[in-house]
Amino acid sequence: MNFSSQGKQLQIDVFRSSLDGLNKSNRLVELGDTLPWDEIEQLYNKRLNNGKRGTGNKPARMIIGALVIKHKMNFSDEDTILAIQENPYMQYFVGLSEFTDKPIFDSSLFVSIRKRLSTADFNDMSVSLLTLQVEKARAASKATPEDKDQSTNDSGASSSNNAFTDSQGRYHEGALKIDATCADAEVRYTTEIELYWQRFGFLPAKIYADKIYLNKTNRKLMKEMEIQAMGKPLGRPSKESRTEEYQAQLVNAVGQRNEIEATFGTGKRIYRANNIRAKLPETANCWTGMCYFVKNVMKFLRELLHALIFVINLLANHASIWRKVTPLPRFAYCGVLND
């Protein structure tokens, strides 16, 4: 007796439909719907030079979205294009309106993209993520006005950062955290403080660093700039260092500084910043910047999920709403961790 299959293989044309019906709780769909694509597009288009000549460029969402997928999944250039070609959720994330079995662009374009973008561009994109998170935090704070003291201020920094204006009229806010991964031990703090000033427009209120950085020269500089050194002081321990409160502050300072070690460690192990497969110096810098930008994107997704849970609790039980607004995430820039 001859047997034949009762089912028939579906044709690929069956799947050529709108992507609007995808599961909205999927992480790529949530990111695609919430990332600040307009700001990212403006930053990306500044790097293009085809206003008067040349063919039209690919959309910024398609380019940056493909880079996010590549570095999050640790794909090669070719495998990234193939994965997007096979996955409707990835196609939605890069901005397609319907499923297609054709490649979104040739994998060789990744080389041109790495030559085009710099670490400064990815830092600016991270700032756009942080700005959007600040707006969400403000909206959450307005929902709980009785918790004003625990909410974030207009600059997005927590009130625990001790923002102040020093005797010279300079504004201080936030914290600068330094690790040997991103700054050589011989680099003077003037270099890192200038980078902080250029990035945020004000000086840090505190600096967290290893003992090797907290030498006499750097401590003198911080004293002149009225920046607090968060670490064990030099010389013989004072009577104050014997109190439990002082020891607790010291332990907290060590824990705060360890955060940047964890940040760069995660970037190297999870997002493969220690496996740069670009040959040219400028493309290698772009690769490194993209690794940490993708890390910030996934951090943004986690904070977005926290915000959704907050809204659900707000709608479900307004009487027993949380008494503390979720703090802002700390985004990693190339060389600086924003606190």
Image (cartoon, rainbow, N blue to C red):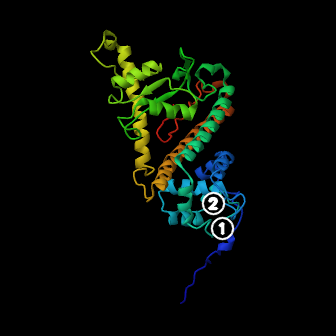
Q: Residue 323 carries which label?
A: none
**Secondary structure under badge 2?**
helix
Front residue of this view, candidates 75 and 119: 119
Farthest left residue in view: 236
- In this picture, is 305 found above or below 99? above
Classed neighbour count for the residue bearing mark 1: other residues with Cα under 10 Å, few (<14), some (14–19), many (≥20):
many
Please report contact status of discs 2 and 1: CB closer than 8 Å, yes or no. Answer: yes
- What residue does disc 1 label? 100
x and y, in percent, of residue 7 in the image: 61, 77
Distance from the alpha carbon under mark 2 to that under mark 1: 8 Å
Residue pictured at 64% horizontal, 54% vertical? 61
Pick the front one: 230 or 6: 230
Q: Where is residue 73 in the image (x, y as percent from the top left)?
A: 49, 56
Report which residue position mark 2 lands on.
91
Q: Please name the amino acid that badge 2 sits on.
A: Gln
28 or 65, which lies in front?
Answer: 65
- Residue kind at label 1, given as amino acid type: Thr
Side of 279 where 163 appears, left or right: right
Q: Position of residue 6 (x, y in %)?
A: 61, 79
Q: How crowded is mark 2: few (under 14 residues within 10 Å), some or many (20 or more)?
A: many
Q: In what element is the residue under mark 1?
A: loop
Can you name the residue that lies furthest to the front here? 52
Say whether residue 301 is visible: yes
Location of residue 93 by image quarter? bottom right
